[in-house]
Amino acid sequence: MSEVIIGVDLGGTNVKTAIVSRDKKVLAKDSRPTNAEGGPEAVMNVMEQSVRELTASQGINLKDVLAVGFGAPGPMNWQTGIVYSPPNLPGWTNVPLAKLMKKRLGVRCFVDNDANVACYGEYWLGAGQGTENMAVLTLGTGVGGGVVVFGKLLRGIDGTAAELGHLKVQRDGRMCGCGSRGCLEAYASVTGMVRTAKEGFEQGKESSLKTLCGGNLDKITGRMIYEAAKEGDAFAQWVFNETATWLGLGIASIVNFLNPEKVVLCGGMIAAGDMLFNPVRETMLANTFEVPGKRCQIVPAGLGEDSGVIGCAGCALARYQAE
Amino acid sequence: MSEVIIGVDLGGTNVKTAIVSRDKKVLAKDSRPTNAEGGPEAVMNVMEQSVRELTASQGINLKDVLAVGFGAPGPMNWQTGIVYSPPNLPGWTNVPLAKLMKKRLGVRCFVDNDANVACYGEYWLGAGQGTENMAVLTLGTGVGGGVVVFGKLLRGIDGTAAELGHLKVQRDGRMCGCGSRGCLEAYASVTGMVRTAKEGFEQGKESSLKTLCGGNLDKITGRMIYEAAKEGDAFAQWVFNETATWLGLGIASIVNFLNPEKVVLCGGMIAAGDMLFNPVRETMLANTFEVPGKRCQIVPAGLGEDSGVIGCAGCALARYQAE
């Protein structure tokens, strides 16, 4: 059996695992519940089992695995492989994930930030293939970011670079989860979009959304806003457009900063297609210099929901080769 | 004579020239009027003469010059060495500067963007020495930007990267010279600071500035605002603080994006010292994550007004060595 790399994307809900060959072929995939409430040991059991079962199912011996790459939620240290205390992994405090998983599997283990691995996945095998400079934004509860320059992940001196969700788009703007105000994430995440809707209702706006959420505004979801907008609800369309405008402004900053070939968007929100991408592109173009603005393509993830797990493998291979 | 590199910083007012040895010693410097109104030929005459006279004065033969690096105002193409049509160089349209100067001097010539060379100068021999990731902001009529990552200038796919003056800090904010709204430059340049003062006066504010400018608000300069603020004028202090706050917000975006060791500020405004740097640092810290915020030092240029000309030589050496 030729040598392979394994990616393990550790999310709050699911653990995804993939085996990738050195020539970039995805050989097998697995997804199973994280069992996050069980704490670190339980979660590591899930990951170990997933890796063992998936390799066994392919007749691959762990000795033939070059490296295992883990994508974990931050804050974390990619160099030591220690995961500090992610909000969605209860009980995790300074867990030396790389070291513990190496002990369990007997294979070299690397740990990276989840948005960085998603970016690397898109760069390596997804929509960013062939670029030298690109950025990824993951649109979910928050807005995660990853950046590739000179064909490498931009990490910064402490490994905290590419926090693109925390570019400032408004002075004294909305309070953000990070503790400061006016971050892109506070407007362009799914949470930010729902907040825009709620603020609209507080101003007395009417919309079919009120029926969709059964009269309980706390139950409004991104999907509901999308559905209502698609059905022609003017208020929901306005909410969507507002969100896209903020996102386009943030991307304009990224384009003027980076002059990238592509900005790749990930996350459930991208299912909205043109309704999202058109106003995003329009706002970006209106707020950038002509050359970088026209150059940069804003595109949906090429690997769908697998950017992260494939990027885990890609990152691990790059780090293995750099050692 | 050992081999040397020459830097030529082409500004709208002055041409600065420096001879630098391979071991980073500045051997000689020259500054003379650009004669910009004479058009491209006249300006190139000035540059040629400066290089010839300065090398002759040091007993250096042009054959012993490895390369000459030019810093020119954008827009331009660093790879072809063509300068398009800088606003402050009348008569310049698509001038193949690298080619023409090579013909005149018989030495390999490289052309780079003026903010990029200032950044590289600070990285190579100034306040950014020893870093791997840093940014420079040049505060003047506009706000120029330069970024070093992985020890190299960040250029992007078309060479337009690091336009840090055009990070968006306010949706639907002030009109900027670039044609869009809410750019950092519209608030944090000297021009932006003067505009903040004028807008204050339009709201009926009182200040000793009115006397300083002889009652003609169009004559207010950055220096006047600084002088008045230093003398305790509350309005001038407010103007200065506003400018510093916007600058700190822009730097916060840079810090969350880049996780740099340093952000270096260049330009006359940095003479204000703590009055500028203290509120800038405070705003940056309040708007970044703890690790990158505490890591990043915001410091004045180490090479004073010579960041550009020394960076011209440094860039040329780096490009010569990469060929």
Image: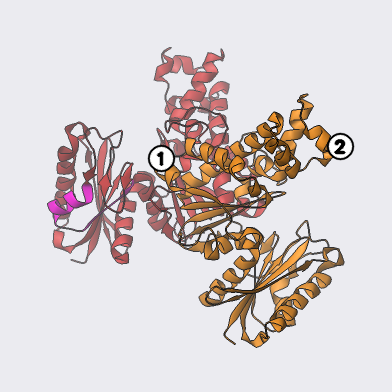
Chain colours: A orange, B red
Q: Is residue B108 magenta?
A: yes
- Horizontal and vertical percent for residue A277? 57, 43
Report the residue marked by disc 2.
A214
Report the residue marked by disc 1.
A290
In the picture, which quadrant includes the C terminus of chain B? Answer: bottom left
Q: Is residue B3 visible?
A: yes
Q: Is label 2 on the same chain as label 1?
A: yes
Identify the mark nearer the N-term, 2 or 1.
2
Asked whether, in this view, residue B156 is left or right of residue B78, the answer is right
* Amino acid beneath label 1: Glu
Question: Which residues are drawn in magenta?
Answer: B97-113
Asked whether, in this view, residue A64 is left or right of residue B179, the answer is right
**As displayed, is residue B19 above or below residue A311?**
above
* Residue drawn 42% across the image and 35% down it: B142
Q: Could you say which is closer to the camera, residue A313 or residue B294? A: A313
Asked whether, in this view, residue A91 is left or right of residue A255, the answer is right
